[in-house]
Amino acid sequence: MGLLQRGKWVDQWYDTDSSGGEFKRQDSRFRHWITAQGEDNRFIAESDRYHLFVSLACPWAHRTLIFRVLKQLQTHIGVTVVKPLMLENGWEFCSGGDDLYGLDFLYELYLKANPNYEGRVTVPLLWDKKQQCIVNNESADIIRIFNSAFNQITGNRDDYYPEPLRKDIDAINQRVYDTINNGVYRAGFATSQSAYEKAYTALFASLDWVDDLLSQQPYLVGGKLTEADWRLFTTLIRFDAVYHGHFKCNRNKLAEYRHIPGYMERLYGMPGVAETVNFDHIKQHYYGSHKTINPFGIIPAGPKPDFGPFARQ
């Protein structure tokens, strides 16, 4: 990853704890909320006002693309996709620049929002075209904004964070985030053997827990599909193709579990979800961008992920 310091771009892939070699993920900085009424009358839900910036490789950005599809927001919220590789200038836009301003690099958009901004430059990023500012760059917030803020516009009232289940969803989200979503990065970017093994052990303990949970019920929170499933899905979909080898999370592949493959097939088969998955983009990014892990940028020819008949269409 990279960050801005005093208006200048600094090429830096990860933060580690100098004492233990553990990967540390910084918090997101923009946390405004869109509602039907608007947060202090500032961010009101409107069609064609907001724009989403994503990478097809990033699991955090992938969540927002899935919710954009699930909540039928495609005609209301535009999307710009960055290039697969993230190198010395961070996330780059395709030739001709981004869809709104013709910028070459994502960090330029952060500076457009705040010329004095210092910190990480990340996707996803939700942009307000009317006020030309960043609304939010935290994926957990963005999917909840999409879950409810635009219901009156789309008529889609599907709720992936229902009030009666929120306590259970939050508890599962916390474990999944700490040990699986972020756990693969903690293993892959560890700079000490002990930090790697700590992350590796917690990761597979939680994957075993997920597989056992799915032996008893179809989704993580009982019989209902919730945001907890989608937050997990975007890590699992990348696991065998990237994290198993590239991040040394190689005790076993997800395909070797008993219940996780069927779970993945159910999620992958939801209308519109398969179209949000781009394995070429995913593999190009991870194997081509992480020079400290894969200095020659060799992209493996396999494996070919298979989530049942939906993946083979």
Image (cartoon, grey):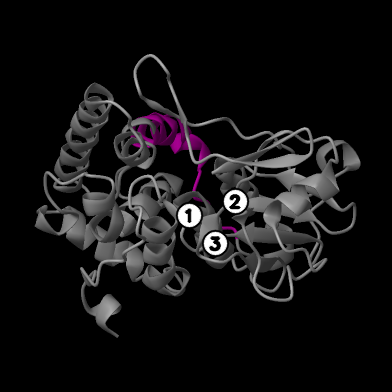
Distance from disc 2 to disc 3, alpha carbons, whole Å, reads 11 Å
**On the rendered image, what quadrant is the C terminus found in?**
bottom left
Q: On the rendered structure, is 117 left or right of 145? A: right
Residue at the disc numbered 3? 65
Give how far across and how far down residue 141 sits, in percent.
61, 41
Residue at the disc numbered 1? 58
Type of residue at label 3?
Leu
Q: Residues within 10 Å of mark 1 (few under 14, many from 20)?
A: many
As drawn, 250 above or below 273? above
The span shown in magenta is 157-177
Give how far across and how far down residue 58 sits, in percent.
48, 54
Can residue 37 be seen in the rendering of this structure? no
Which label sits on residue 123? 2
Type of residue at label 1?
Cys
Q: Residue at x 52, y 37 (%)?
A: 163
As drawn, 23 above or below 237? above
Q: Earlier in the sequence, mark 2 or mark 1?
A: 1
Type of residue at label 2?
Val
Is residue 243 inside the magenta stretch? no
- What element does badge 1 sit on? loop
Does the CB distance between marks 3 and 1 fall below 8 Å?
Answer: no
Does the CB distance between marks 2 and 1 fall below 8 Å?
Answer: yes
As drawn, 244 above or below 210? below
Distance from disc 3 to disc 1, alpha carbons, whole Å, reads 11 Å
Does the CB distance between marks 2 and 3 fall below 8 Å?
Answer: no
Give how far across and how far down residue 66 sits, in percent.
50, 61
Can residue 300 be seen in the rendering of this structure? yes
